[in-house]
Amino acid sequence: MKRFLLAVVVLVAALAAVLVYNTSRAPVSVAEASRPAAITIDSAGAIARFAKALTFPTISWDPGTHPVDSAAFRGMQAHLAESFPLVHKTLKHEVINHLSLLYTWPGSNPALAPVVLMGHQDVVPVIPGTEGLWQQPPFSGAIAGGFVWGRGSLDDKLTVLATLEAIETLLRQGYQPKHTVYLAFGHDEEIGGQEGARVLRDTLVARGLKTAALVLDEGGAIAEGTMLGVPGRIALIGVSEKGSLSLELTIKGKGGHSSTPPAHTAIGQLAKVIEKIEASPFPATLDGPTRWMLDALSPSMPYSRRLAMSNLWLFGPVVEKAMLAKPPSAAMLRTTTAFTMVSGGVKTNVLPIDAKAVVNFRIRPGETMQSVTERVRRIVNDTAVAIRDLGFHSDPSPVSDPKGAGFAALAKSVREEFGANAVTVTPYLVIGGTDARYWSGLSSQTFRFMGAPIEADGLERVHGTNERAPLASYVSSVRYLVRLVRNTDDIP
């Protein structure tokens, strides 16, 4: 017995030594480097130009429901031309496929692959009947309480206006980039981007574009570190985005009078199918971009959490369980399943002829639309259930290299603007979709990041009520983009 206890003690001591050793190998946060020179911009003017852009209702409605309000897009584009005269005088400016915008800024070294800065002009509609819930009218562009209010203030006119503001600032300074810079602003991102971003990409490819040194679109942002258990702020730079697939499930019934129903109507049968699918979530995993994120955040965590993150071979299941407990972090670990629409029946005393449900999947890298569909068919395992894909769909994007020169330029610009020891830069899996999906195949340095700090509830405001951007965040994003364009000169 003594030998057994001694062996247990030795094993525990050895395990403790391994845990401590692995934790000690994890780098700790570095001291802040000297800050570069301050960048001066016309803050009041920049905010006013941004606010006015929000007054144009450049709405993307679901296809077939409303006509495109071309006048709203034209009005905003006229505002851009008036607001950024040097951009429109110096850069080649084109309207592609009626409403998308393409600007070309020739670089001093045409042998270098270009840089592509993206954004989208369109916004989602405000749900009818909810306008009165807004503290400021949704298309007012009001400046109040330290915020710019309006639909698109976060998604995504902030990116479009901040990019143009930064380029205008650089032109006033007499700067010319080494890389040719393309500004590509689509007009239909909110309904898939197939007429905007995809056509913009195809246009440049037809002109000879083969690769890009850096592609940057919306996606991640600068958030409070408390959401992931670290001090200060975290810059979540999206290195990939999840795919999207909606499947329609249909069950046929015989109809008839409700006084003589079968054991299960079509609606009842469909309910069982829904229950089976929801009871079979996709497997979770800590690999890929999510693992990279945890590795990047680990040095800033308290010792106990750093110990767990440095020894995921042992604590991985515990970390995974904790992340799965919250929907935002759970979405980083697995393909998500969300039933979003159900229909069936036309009258209270009539048995339904059929019942339908739509389930939306956001597909994690490593899985595909095909693998998701096949999994659903196996779970349902019923030939009476018709399954078909519905609407826009896409596979997950390729994962970009966070060790590349493009990511380094982004990280350097963030640290210069916000302070090296005040923000932790990390790769991130974007759980939504962006127009960058069309560019990932052309560059291993395709990223999704809005260089602006957002409020703790900022994600709830995107596509929601009372969308707004802090004034200071918008100004910071302009300065960050000025730094980024300059830092692209370091990309070989």
Image (cartoon, rainbow, N blue to C red):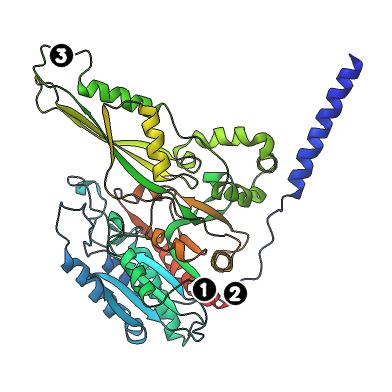
Residue receiving disc 2 = 36
Q: Residue at x 25, y 73 (%)?
A: 77
Residue receiving disc 1 = 483
Residue receiving disc 3 = 261
Residue 417 lies, in percent from the top left, at: 54, 67
Residue 222 lies, in percent from the top left, at: 49, 56
Which mark identifies residue 317?
none
Q: Earlier in the sequence, mark 1 or mark 3?
A: 3
Q: Is residue 154 left or right of residue 175?
A: left
Q: Residue at x 26, y 22 (%)?
A: 269
Labels 1 and 2 touching (C-beta < 8 A): yes
Of helix, strand and loop, which one carries label 3? loop
Assess disc 3: are there few (<14), some (14-19) or many (≥20) residues with their C-alpha within 10 Å of its C-alpha: few
Q: Residue at x 27, y 51 (%)?
A: 135
Give the CA distance from mark 1 to mark 2.
10 Å
Q: Earlier in the sequence, mark 2 or mark 3?
A: 2
Query: Which amino acid type is shown beneath numbered disc 3?
Result: Pro
- Direction front: furthest residue: 383
Q: Earlier in the sequence, mark 1 or mark 2?
A: 2
Tell us which disc is closer to us: 1 or 2.
Answer: 1
Q: Nearer the viewer, residue 175 or 471?
A: 175
Give the CA distance from mark 1 to mark 3.
69 Å
Residue 36 figure quarter: bottom right
Q: Residue at x 31, y 22 (%)?
A: 272
Labels 2 and 3 touching (C-beta < 8 A): no
Of helix, strand and loop, which one carries label 1? helix
* Residue 450 seen in render: no
Residue 342 lies, in percent from the top left, at: 23, 33
Q: Is residue 292 above or below residue 56?
A: above
Residue 179 lies, in percent from the top left, at: 49, 79
Assess disc 2: are there few (<14), some (14-19) or many (≥20) residues with their C-alpha within 10 Å of its C-alpha: few
Q: Is residue 475 above or below residue 336?
A: below
